[in-house]
Image (tube, rainbow, N blue to C red):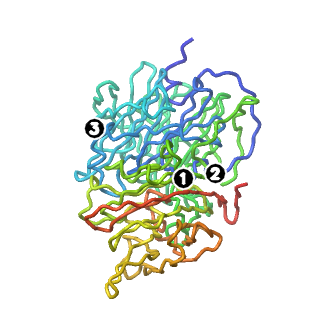
């Protein structure tokens, strides 16, 4: 029997193998920790009763990640829909701003195909295009298609995909009011837009998602902007063209005007599981109502989960988002083996063995213009990652062009408390300004760096190796930035790799330190820098941790080598003074 199109495409209700009815059990938020904003999720019974989610990626590459889970609490990175520049060649040249790129995708499944529709924002034209990627296999990067450009009738953001009962496809998008248009998924052509719903009186109506249930069309939207007044609201109608009735329970979820630890709650999606239980996901930021004022949270907007009660013919109702919640989590079949997670909540232990690849969850800032700048285990330096330095440092300047390349490779910070370390091999650099280091990187205008720098000693006609700790925050003047901390590298350390450490010691500060890799327990504390430099305001993207190599403007070639990449999660703060510790 063929399942009705509406249920497949709109909210993932499919006939499924009968599973045990779950009892309520405890889970913790965020389910996708670290920078994972604007989530969109589905349930697909045909893929082993699996849930799939995507989140915004902005200028990070690979982009448009797709995560998979069978229990809603353990998530693996299945693939990235945007994983090769050939899919959208302009991404290497057109996205020069720090807060543009891939925004607020919608992920849907219909007749055996996964669809990911996203908004691509770029410069120099301040353009916005809708682009569509599809695949038959969400676990295979190479199976995602090249981008199909879908007409954006109003130059808006946050496109949604919805299949109606007659097979027609509707794309809703942001606006006041929310608007929609019928589209052709073969050509990308869009029909004449029509008005839908204007929300409940707050601004920034965006993030629409359409569903059909019990002969009603439901329109879920975000309102209030993505900061402290953010919310999710819902309306319904017998017709896509209205009139729309606002839910008496609006907002469905929000944290505005509360003292809850999870703030900015909004931009949601709804889906049901194999047992007919409904769930919602939303973005949220930890830190309480003093966010962007007194409270700092450099991981920025994360993905949270909440159970939803949605009776037949009635309205959905949800509990407020908290760090600890209860709900009817799916029960996986007894004895089912889980493959080791490739990302979420796990540590990195990477030794760059010959024949290995760059881990799939690692990220570049923009699609790398020169992939050869990142070479694993070259013959002359086995078990290392060779970083061919970029002329630009990771700040760059007004003359920076994306095609010049940026030698920076990162992963997402996913824990409140953590330790990140990399071994840097000495002997690189022959010219003053050559540098290899590690960074807490939000984007090129906001980062904290610990580098080993070649420094010219003009008086003695010599060069010295120094540690340099410095921060970049374009939102404040140079006079307000902490002064760079420059410390000589001990001469005794020059014969073996030097281990650079970044520790998240709380939500307000990062500790930078170093040691000889041969005596890593004998650390030299170098700096304690405030997390406000990378998280004191709404920056849209969250903290990444990684390694870089640069000539700091020098027009010469330089190669640096790193090894023993480690990320060790220690704890999550999920409430005021409430921690979940890694075991």
Q: Secondary structure at mark 1?
A: strand
Alpha carbon distance from label 3 to label 1 = 30 Å
| 357 horizontally vs 149: left or right | right
Which circle's residue, 3 or 1, is located before the other in the chain?
3
Secondary structure under badge 3?
A: loop
Q: Classify residue 260 by image quadrant.
A: bottom right
> In whole angstroms, how far apart are the C-alphas of marks 2 and 1?
9 Å
Q: Nearer the viewer, mark 3 or mark 2?
A: 2
In terms of sequence position, does the residue under pointer 3 or pointer 2 come before the other? 2
**Label 2 with label 1: CB-CB less than 8 Å:** yes
Residue 86 lies in quadrant: top left
Q: In the figure, 397 relative to 525: above or below?
A: above
Residue 16: x and y in percent read 64, 22
Which label number is shown at residue 29? 2
Q: Nearer the viewer, residue 271 or 375?
A: 375
Q: Which of the marked residues, 2 or 1, is nearer the chain's N terminus?
A: 2
Q: Position of residue 523 (x, y in %)?
A: 61, 74
- Count numbered badges in the picture: 3
Q: Is residue 200 above or below residue 338?
A: below
Q: How far apart are the alpha carbons under marks 3 and 2?
A: 37 Å
Q: Quadrant for the C terminus, please.
A: bottom right
Instruction: Provide the residue designation for mark 1.
Output: 302
Q: Nearer the viewer, residue 412 or 29?
A: 412
Residue at label 3?
153
């Amino acid at each position: 029997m063929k399942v009705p199109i509406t249920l497949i495409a709109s909210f993932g209700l499919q006939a499924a193998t009968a599973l045990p009815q779950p009892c309520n059990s405890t889970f913790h938020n965020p389910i996708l920790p670290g920078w994972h904003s604007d989530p969109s999720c589905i349930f697909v019974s045909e893929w082993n009763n699996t849930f799939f989610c995507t989140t915004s990626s902005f200028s990070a590459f690979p982009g448009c990640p797709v995560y998979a889970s069978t229990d809603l609490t353990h998530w693996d990175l299945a693939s990235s829909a945007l994983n090769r520049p050939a899919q959208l060649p302009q991404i290497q040249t057109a996205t020069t701003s720090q807060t543009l790129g891939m925004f607020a995708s919608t992920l849907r499944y219909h007749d055996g195909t996964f669809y990911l529709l996203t908004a691509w924002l770029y410069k120099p034209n301040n353009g916005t295009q809708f682009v569509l990627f599809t695949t038959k296999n969400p676990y295979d990067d190479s199976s995602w298609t090249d981008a199909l450009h879908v007409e954006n009738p109003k130059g808006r953001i946050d496109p949604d995909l919805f299949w109606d009962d007659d097979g027609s496809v509707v794309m809703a998008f942001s606006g006041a009011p929310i608007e929609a248009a019928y589209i052709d998924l073969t050509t990308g052509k869009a029909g004449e837009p029509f008005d839908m719903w204007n929300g409940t009186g707050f601004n920034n109506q965006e993030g629409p998602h359409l569903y059909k249930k019990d002969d009603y069309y439901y329109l879920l939207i975000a309102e209030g902007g993505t900061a402290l007044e953010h919310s999710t609201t819902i309306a319904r109608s017998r017709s896509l063209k209205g009139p729309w009735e606002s839910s008496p329970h609006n907002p469905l979820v929000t944290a505005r005007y509360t003292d809850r630890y999870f703030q900015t709650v909004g931009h949601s999606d709804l889906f049901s599981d194999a047992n007919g239980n409904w769930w919602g996901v939303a973005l949220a930021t930890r830190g309480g109502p003093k966010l962007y004022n007194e409270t700092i949270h450099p991981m920025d907007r994360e993905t949270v989960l909440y159970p939803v009660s949605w009776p037949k013919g009635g309205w959905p109702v949800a509990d407020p988002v908290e760090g600890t919640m209860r709900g009817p989590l799916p029960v996986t079949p007894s004895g089912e083996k889980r493959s080791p997670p490739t990302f979420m909540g796990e540590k990195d232990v990477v030794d760059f063995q010959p024949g290995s690849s760059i881990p799939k969850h690692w990220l570049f800032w923009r699609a790398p213009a020169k992939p050869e700048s990142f070479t694993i285990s070259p013959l002359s330096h086995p078990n290392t990652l060779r970083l061919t330095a970029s002329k630009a440092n990771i700040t760059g300047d007004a003359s920076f062009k994306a095609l010049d390349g940026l030698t920076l490779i990162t992963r997402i910070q996913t824990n409140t408390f953590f330790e990140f370390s990399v071994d840097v091999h000495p002997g690189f650099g022959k010219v003053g300004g050559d540098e290899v280091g590690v960074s807490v990187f939000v984007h090129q205008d906001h980062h904290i760096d610990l580098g080993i720098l070649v420094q010219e000693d003009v008086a003695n006609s010599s060069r010295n190796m120094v540690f340099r700790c410095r921060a970049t925050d374009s939102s404040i003047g140079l006079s307000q930035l902490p002064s760079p901390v420059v410390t000589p590298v001990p001469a005794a350390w020059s014969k073996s790799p030097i281990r650079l450490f970044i520790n998240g010691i709380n939500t307000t500060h990062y500790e930078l330190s170093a040691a000889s890799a041969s005596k890593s327990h004998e650390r030299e504390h170098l700096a304690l820098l405030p997390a406000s430099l990378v998280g004191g305001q709404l920056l849209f993207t969250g903290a990444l941790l990684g390694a870089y190599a640069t000539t700091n403007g020098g027009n010469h070639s330089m190669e640096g080598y790193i090894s023993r990449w480690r990320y060790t999660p220690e704890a999550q703060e999920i409430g005021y003074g409430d921690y979940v510790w890694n075991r």
